[in-house]
Image (tube, rainbow, N blue to C red):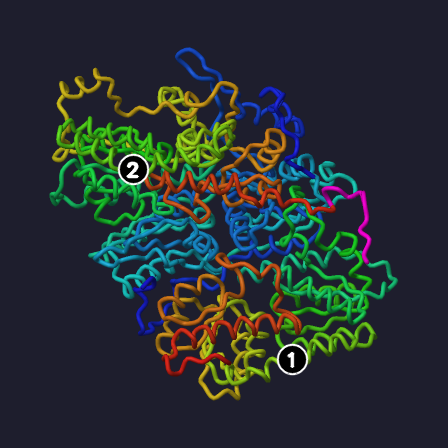
Amino acid sequence: MATAKKKLVQWEPTDVKKELLKKYPAKVARKRAKQILINEALENTTPEITANVRTIPGIITMRGCTYAGCKGVIMGPTRDIVNLVHGPIGCSFYAWLTRRNQTDAGVDGENYIPYCFSTDMQDSDIIFGGEKKLAAAIQEIYDIFHPKAITIFATCPVGLIGDDIHTVARNMKAQLGDCNVFAFSCEGYKGVSQSAGHHIANNQVFTHMVGENNDEKAGEYKINLLGEYNIGGDGFEIDRILRKCGITTISTFSGNSTYDQFASAHKADLSCVMCHRSINYVADMMETKFGIPWIKVNFIGAKSTIKSLRKIAEYFGDQKLIDRVEAVIAEEMPAVDAVCSDVLTRTAGKTAMLFVGGSRAHHYQDLFAEMGMKTISAGYEFAHRDDYEGRRVIPTLKVDADSRNIEELEIEADPERFKPRKTEAELKALEEKGFKFKEYDGIMPDMDPGALVIDDCNQYEAEKLVELMKPDIFCAGIKEKFSIQKLGVPMKQLHSYDSGGPYAGFKGAVNFYKEIDRLVNSKVWSYMKAPWQESPELSATYVWE
Amino acid sequence: MLLRHTPKEISERSAVTINPAKTCQPIGAMYAALGIHGCLPHSHGSQGCCAYHRSALTRHYKEPVSASTSSFTEGSSVFGGQANLLQAINNIFTVYDPEIIAVHTTCLSETIGDDLNQIFDKAYKEGTVPKGKTLVGAPTPSYVGSHVTGFSNMVKAMADLAEPTGKKNGKVNVIPGWVEPSDMEEIKRLAKLVGADITLFPDTSGVLNGPLSGEYHMFPQGGVTVAELKGCGDAIGTLALGEWCSADAARLLDTKYKVPCRILDMPFGLKATDRFIDALRTISGTVVPEEVSYERGQLVDLISDMHQYFYHKKVALFGDPDQLIAMTEFLVSIDMCPVHLVTGTPGKRFEKRIKELTKDMPFEVNVRAKGDLFLLHQWIKNEPVDLLIGNTYGKYIARDEDIPFIRWGFPILDRQGHQYFPTVGYKGGLHFLEKVLNALLDRMDRDSAEEKFELVY
């Protein structure tokens, strides 16, 4: 039995780490020791963490699979593409509406998000192959819905029985004529986590959709927003702010996205990367092929939103935009400040732990900081070393057996459409002013020395951390939620946000302040014990007359 | 309209399933295994399966659901998952120390051909299973049957833990099927009232409806113990509630361990509960106390009091075969008319049974095993209904077609209560009819013209 009663004020991080590892078999302890790190401020560098390595069988992980990363995360929020899962029914069923990607069906009204499509493979398909059934399913979907595109997702058995989904896709695309059909080899066993699935998805999106529509797009200051999935309406709030500033979003990868957004993405003049983990390579490919530079942005937290807006304005360098951005900030911030200063009186000094995603464990620290809350431990579920230590480590990353299987696209400049958005001199001038392109320093430089950074944190470690360090709030996913709350510590889901959102942008920051205030100060945490449990001894008796 | 692309015209489909009314085997096995005390369910496949099943069960129960996985990589998919499972067994007993690990397979490990028994043998021989601890395994290929099949397979594996001593222990095995923890609790209460000494398995009460007390127990109080399961071979008989979920286990106990069995319907509603109570008292040789007859009378009373609101109301239902069969009988018994029924689980017997139960109804019945919600929605568009009953996914149809909707089945992701308030038994029947009345009468209150708006129903 675990309880979160003891508060570990006197424990050193090294002791906590020792406690976390104590119960493991020696081999497991050795491996986990490299993924649990005590943050230190080193000069010009960061300590090295092991990340993006295999999950240990039997250790209750927070991670999901490659299919989840591909179908669930990247393609899930696309609204006018029919996503067809080729496999037994479960994989499609579990990815059906469970990620809280909000969608506006728009004027065209096409919206397949409430639908779930599967070939529902049976044993005969496993034995004799499922290609015919897959082709028939595509035809049936086309006949009923006539969508712009049908995409196919491979599940575990598909790879094993050798169904050639890409050939089926190619043939069906040719046969149908006016429907793009392509496939993802995203079998669940590939890679070590969802991350491989993001990569497989993005590669195919880039290959089969980006650049398909060469029509000019109206609007000024055109950007792509990469790695924003519109969970709880985050994307809607970011869109609202960008629109208000006069910035045109050509495409969002992939929250509330449409086929045409992907197809037109090469028409943007800047790529803004939200979730570094799931999409930084797309930003690189956009730059190489079309000449679109990229910057890292973060719309989680009011201050981060301001910083990101200013960065975009500075890139375009147009005084009209710079002034507009400042006017929007001035207009939006009073409401944010009002709530923040009120909430601060109840949240300041409290502590948080964040184990989520590939970027959120970093981004959300900004919001907690705005509330005066300190992040005492954090880590990613499926990130790579560059998300911890910064992009400077990318050239030194070793390609292991698991990452070797995930295709890296060889991209060259498009002979007709490559167009540098800025001249060498302009870029240099920006950089001299301190403007940073394609830079991300990772989570560790932003965390306090002594904070515990834990990669692929598991259920046992999470429970132990809460028991030892008793944070005021713990953030992870649905699977972790209730074991933490049983300990009397509030838990906020940062994958799908439980029920709230948006948390991005200005209105999102206000929502988040209120939500965290509600959680950490809820009366319910004081109801754990009944009066007779708190003082079981009878000290007096009533005399009834 | 959320399901705006669903046309009224029905075209036959042979290849694509749209909006399924089932999921895959392993989650059923995981749910069943959670009904064993001190059990860690283990998914032998890639880690996404386990993550998805845990997430779905957690969303349904709002409770911790611990389960581990073999975390297959590409290598294990080629060379087999034995090494991963052996390593997992060792890690699980060292770190989590459960009494029993209940392993189920996945489409991945089944396609490769991993043999759980052979891997278990190796684990025992290598000494990775501490003395007194147990491994149990069930094959649950996702490409056969549905989540119901997986549940049944794990329950069968549980029954096969029986170690008969040759001496009858006077107990009755009751296999409740895939019902809620609240239902399992209610079955135990009824058995106690009837004076029958039962072994209920699986039993998720006390596991997935636990209290919040500031303490976390990875293995909560509830669940059937391994010792009780070993004893089920000495029982005087088995009552299996539901052909799809429970019959295989009961028949195994019958043929292999000579424990006679009866297959009943799930005790939803008056008639099925009558049969259950009657079978229970017969097999255990007890007298049904007045208290139970009194509860029965209360249910009959409510049916009689509110019959005018049930009479000839058309209902569409989707869910799992055992549940739908019993519920259809219940609805027909109060003169409601189930007109569209879909289960995603295959089995022609289902269609046959529903047709029998509804043969005297004044309306045509559409029934489909291995159907989906897309088809159900199309049926509803062609022949509208007064009430929709099914899991949370039904809310999209209910909203689009503006139909009163009762959440019942698995999964329920957006309402609470299923883990606390039963549907089985007479009390469960009362509770369910309360929901039916609320749904129908709220709608009447909403839609009636001002001059027809009434105070008393």
Q: Is A241 left, or right, of B405 in this rendering?
A: left
- Viewer-proximal residue among A126 and B347: B347
SS state under label 1: helix
- Viewer-proximal residue among B306 and B119: B306
Give, as a three-letter code, the residue at label 2. Leu
Spot the residue most to the top.
Answer: A43
Reply above or below: A38 against B43. above
From which residue to which does the magenta span run?
Answer: A533-545
Mark sitting on residue B271: 1
Give, as a three-letter code, the residue at label 1. Lys
Q: Magenta residues: mostly which secondary structure?
A: loop
Residue B90 pos. (x, y %): 67, 36
Check the residue under mark 2 and report the chain it is in: A
Reply above or below: A74 against A136. above
Check the residue under mark 1 and report the chain it is in: B
In the rendered image, residue A541 lying in the magenta stretch gets the answer: yes
Q: Is B285 left, or right, of A63 in this rendering?
A: right
In the rendered image, residue B143 lying in the magenta stretch gets the answer: no
Reply above or below: A237 against A286. below
Mark sitting on residue A226: 2
Residue B112 visible in the snapshot: no
**Count of numbered badges drawn on the protein:** 2
Spot the residue most to the right.
Answer: B167
Instruction: Identify the residue shown where x is 87% and y is 61%.
Output: B166
Residue B58 pos. (x, y %): 55, 50
SS state under label 2: strand
